[in-house]
Image (cartoon, rainbow, N blue to C red):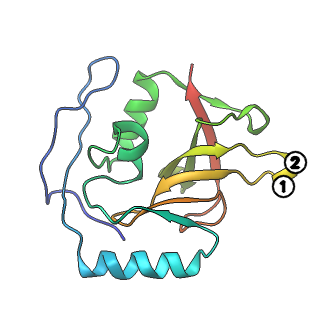
């Protein structure tokens, strides 16, 4: 469920320091998107879908741009994290509303909002609210999604 940049329009979006953030809106939802959404939902049965599919925003657009657009580039995410003064926090310090970042090959590939922090009672497996590509938003266990559970937690300093 990967939509490549270059197929939509950009909106004005900037970091708190005023640096522009590359982004793209594309409302299209393709048959392939629908296939992947159904496949992911069938594979992750404990994940609870919310609403309908939308190509307008992706996970990073949900977390960092209030569902307004897609943010694709790792460079742009790095800019947001630095300019907006996000800091990494220890798993034991995570609170509801903090952000979870999923990494592959040392790059952020997915982001979500922590709904229920990791703790001993849930075997250190948080509940997360996120969006899966052009698919739906889901409330899911941190390790029950299409992304590898190699994560860091962040919040605004």
Q: Quadrant of the C terminus?
A: top right
Dividing the image into 4 quarters, which one contains the N terminus? bottom left
Outermost right residue: 120
State the residue at coordinates (31%, 75%).
Answer: 33
SS class of the residue under badge 1? loop
> How far is disc 2 from disc 1 in space, using C-alphas?
5 Å
Element carrying mark 2:
helix
Side of 107 relative to 26 (left or right): right
Dot 1 corresponds to which residue? 123
Seen at 28% across and 65% down, the residue is: 3
Question: Badge 1: few (under 14), some or many (20 or more) residues near its Cα, within 10 Å?
Answer: few
- Residue 10, relative to residue 45: is it above or below? above
Where residue 87 appears, as percent x and y from the top left, is 58, 26
Q: Residue at x 13, y 55 (%)?
A: 8
- Compared with 98, 46 (above or below) is below
Q: Answer above or below: position of 67 versus 87.
A: below
* Residue closer to the observer: 155 or 20: 155
**Count of all numbered marks drawn on residues in the image:** 2
State the image coordinates of residue 46 (x, y, percent, origin top left).
64, 70
Q: Which mark is residue 120?
A: 2
Q: At 59% across and 34% down in the image, what residue appears?
A: 154
Q: Position of residue 95 (x, y in %)?
A: 68, 33
CB-based contact (under 8 Å), mark 2 and mark 1: yes
């Amino acid at each position: 469920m990967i939509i490549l940049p270059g197929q939509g329009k950009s909106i004005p979006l900037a970091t708190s320091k005023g640096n522009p953030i590359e982004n793209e809106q594309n409302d299209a939802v393709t048959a392939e998107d629908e296939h992947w959404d159904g496949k992911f939902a069938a594979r992750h049965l404990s994940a609870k879908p919310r609403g309908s599919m939308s190509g307008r925003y992706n996970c990073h657009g949900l977390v960092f741009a209030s569902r307004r657009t897609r943010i694709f580039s790792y460079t742009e995410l790095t800019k947001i994290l630095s300019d907006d003064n996000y800091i990494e926090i220890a798993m034991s310090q995570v609170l509801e509303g903090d952000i979870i970042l999923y990494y592959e090959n040392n790059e952020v590939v997915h982001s979500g909002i922590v709904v229920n922090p990791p703790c001993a009672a849930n075997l250190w497996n948080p509940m997360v609210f996120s969006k899966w590509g052009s698919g739906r938003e889901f409330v899911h266990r941190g390790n029950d999604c299409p992304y590898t559970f190699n994560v860091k937690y962040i919040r605004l300093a």
